[in-house]
Amino acid sequence: MGLASFRSLIRPFVPKFLLELHRRRWEQRQERHQRHIIDEFHKIYYPSRVHEAYWLGVPALKCPLDCWVYAEIIFSTKPEIIVETGVCYGGTTLYLASLCDLLGQGTVIGVDLELQNVRDPVRQHPRIHFIEGNSVDPAVLEQVWQWCRGKRTMVILDSDHHAAHVLQELRSYGEMVTPGCYLICEDTNLNGNPVFSPVPYNPGPKEAMDMFLKEQEDAWVVDKGCEKFLMTFNPGGYLKKK
């Protein structure tokens, strides 16, 4: 029996406040059940499937559901510059550039400490520009700023996941993001949120993001609508600049 049918059956005999209490408890149980299913799926998917997504033959270390959300964000906000820290093989970089191709505008700036693993199709794409070095090094930041100044800018952070580094990135790259555009802090599901990584980041991206939002809570909105597909590697990490 559904909740609506149950309420109709007992309504004549039960005070209104008790019906409302029952409704709230039922919804809370449903939310806990849903959260448990999502968390368990994270634990299964993240360690075993994260290396099995490809874009045009290049490994893209992302949840495909997040990639769909990125496409919707890019279409709605029309960034001229998309900065991605942490490139690895370049599959996501190529994916972002492909979206820019579809929209007929945009440049992707890929920042990584080492770029030797980047595949040739990524290197050859005319919309992609790489900057090699530590993403929070002042010289690297200045190079990125040269691309971003005066341009509508979106940033995706996916490099070193230790909290101290992520917090530096959030502070530095957050300044580059244009109001109305997004700063995405990736892999906030690590450190037991709910995934435990083989690498002990403790604390990690989520903890850094929480500290950042305490510092700049008036400047950002956590867009939970970007988690509409339930499974995301970036829970709470979709930050939209006011």
Image (cartoon, rainbow, N blue to C red):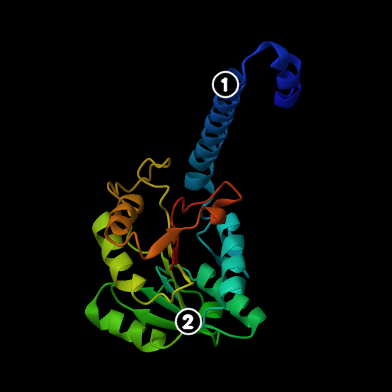
Query: How many callouts does the rendering have?
Result: 2
Which residue shows up at 35% across the image and 44% down it? 191
Q: Position of residue 79 (x, y in %)?
A: 52, 79
**Left or right position of 163 against 35:** left
Q: Position of residue 136 (x, y in %)?
A: 27, 72
Which residue shows up at 61% across the image and 50% down it? 229
Tell me the CA gap for discs 2 and 1.
Answer: 51 Å
Q: From the viewer's side, name the closer residue of 236 and 119.
A: 236
The circle drawn on residue 233 is none
Instruction: Determine if residue 16 is in view.
Output: yes
- SS assignment at label 1: helix
- Pointer 2 with pointer 1, Cβ within 8 A: no
N-terminal of the two: label 2 or label 1? 1
Binning the other alpha carbons within 10 Å of mark 1 as few (below 14), some (14 to 19) or many (20 upward) gives few
Residue 87 lies, with reference to residue 126, above or below; the image says above
Residue 11 lies, with reference to residue 66, above or below; the image says above
Q: Position of residue 233 (x, y in %)?
A: 48, 52
Q: From the viewer's side, name the closer residue of 50 and 57.
A: 50
Depth-wise, is mark 2 or mark 1 nearer the camera?
Answer: 1
Instruction: Determine if residue 185 is in view.
Output: no
Residue 65 lies, with reference to residue 122, above or below; the image says above
Q: Quadrant of the C terminus?
A: bottom left
Which residue shows up at 56% across the image and 74% down it? 77
**Left or right position of 237 against 14:** left
Q: Amino acid at mark 1?
A: Phe
- SS assignment at label 2: loop
Q: Amino acid at mark 2?
A: Arg
Which residue shows up at 42% across the image and 54% down it? 187
Mark 1 = which residue?
17
Q: Position of residue 216 (x, y in %)?
A: 31, 62
Q: From the viewer's side, name the closer residue of 64 and 211.
A: 211
Mark 2 = which residue?
152
